[in-house]
Image: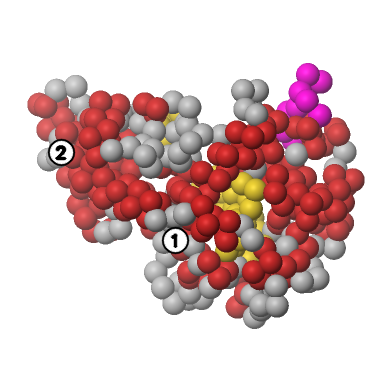
Amino acid sequence: ERLTKQRAHRFLRRGLFFSHRDLDMLLNAYEQGEPFYLYTGRGPSSEALHLGHLVPFWFTKWLQDAFNVPLVIQLTDDEKFLFKENLTVEECKRLAYENAKDILAIGFDKDKTFIFSDLDYIQTMYPLVLQIQKKVTYNQSRGIFGFTESDNIGKSAFPAVQAAPAFPACFPAMFGNRKDIMCLIPQAIDQDPYFRMTRDVAPRLGFNKPALIHSRFVPALQGNQTKMAGSQVASSIFVTDTPKEIKTKINKYAFSGGRATVEEHRELGADLSVDVSYQYLTYLMEDDQELKRIGDDYAAGRLLTGEVKQKLVDVLQPIIKAHQDARAKITDEDVRSFMDPTRFEGKKLI
C-alpha cells in the first residue's frame, strides 16, 4: 500500500493470495527504482474460462494498474497438445485464440501487454528455451514433475518453455538486450514446481530469479475437497453461464455449511469454513464491512443458507454479465494486435 498509494486488493486482504517467493526483495528493489514486469498464463484446453481461471488474471490486472508495469501472458497451446490425448495441434491453437478473448476482456493495458501463443512465438523463444533445457537434467524433470517412462518426451521438454518468459531475453521487442529486469509471476499454487525449477536455473544463465506470488484454488461448488474444473460443468461457474444457469448451479450444487434443520441452524449457526457460497463472497465482494456482517449473521444463525446463496447470486450475476459484454467487444483483430510483438519496437516500456 505504501508503494502503490492504494489499498491492497481484496485477494491479498483475505488471503486468497497467501504465499510468495522473494516478493519482498522485488518490492524493495522497485522502491529503489529497479523495474520489473509481470508474467502469467493460461493453458487453453476448454472453450471458456471459469471463475477459478479469472482469479489470477483479475489480480494481475490490479498489479499492472497499481505498478504501471509491462505484462506478458503465455498461452501454452503446445503444452495442452502434449498433455491432452484428445486434442490436435489445430484445436489447441484455436482454443488459445478463443481464450485470449476472455483474457483481454479483463481490460489489460494494451500499450504494456503482450499475449502470445507458444506455437506462434516459439521461434523467438527457442534459443532461450534451449539454454534452459541444457541446464535441467532428465532426472530433475522427472523428480519435479513426476514424469514416467511411458510419458511422451515432449512433456519432459516442455517445462523449459514455461520457464523462458520469466527472463526478459524472451522479449527482445519489449526489453531489448537487458538481462537485469526482474519478473513477478502471479500464479495458482499448482504452478510452483515449474518456477522453482526456473529459479534454480536463473543465476546459471545470468538472470534474476523471478519472484512468485501464489493463490489458493477456488473450490468447486461441491466443496473444498476439489477445485473448479473446466471439464466438469456442474463444478464451476463459467464466463459463458447465463443468469439462470448461475442461480441454478449455486442453489443446486454450492456446498452448504448450514445445519440440517432451521431450528438447529438458528441455534448453532453455519460453519463458514466449509460453506462455498460464503467463500465465494469473500473472493468477490469488495465491501469488507458488508462481508463481515454477512459472515457474523450466518455464523450466528441469523441468516439461512438460502439467503446467503441469494446474496452470492446477486453479486456474481453482474460480474459475469459485465465480462460477457466486454468479451463481445473483443474482435479477432484485437487479438492479433495484442499478439503482435513488433508494436513495441522503438518504445520505452521500462
Q: Residue at x 28, y 41 (%)?
A: 278
How packed is label 1: few (under 14 Cα within 10 Å), some, or many (20 or more)? some
Q: Nearer the viewer, mark 1 or mark 2?
A: 1
Callout 2 amino acid: Glu
Q: Is residue 115 left or right of residue 1?
A: right
How packed is label 2: few (under 14 Cα within 10 Å), some, or many (20 or more)? few
SS at mark 2? helix
Callout 1 amino acid: Gly
Which mark is first along the chain, 2 or 1?
A: 1
Viewer-nearest residue: 185 or 339: 339
In the image, residue 107 lies in the stretch drawn in magenta: no
Residue 323 lies, with reference to residue 343, above or below; the image says above
Residue 250 lies, with reference to residue 67, above or below; the image says above
Residue tagged 1: 107
Magenta stretch in the rendered image:
144-153
Residue 124 position within the rendered picture, expressed as x and y whole percent measured from the top left: 78, 56
SS at mark 1? loop
Q: Is residue 27 visible?
A: yes
Disc 1 to disc 2, how far (Cα)?
A: 32 Å
The quadrant in which residue 79 appears is top right
Residue tagged 2: 307
Q: Residue at x 17, y 33 (%)?
A: 306
In the image, residue 147 lies in the stretch drawn in magenta: yes
Viewer-nearest residue: 184 or 91: 91
Q: Is residue 36 visible?
A: no
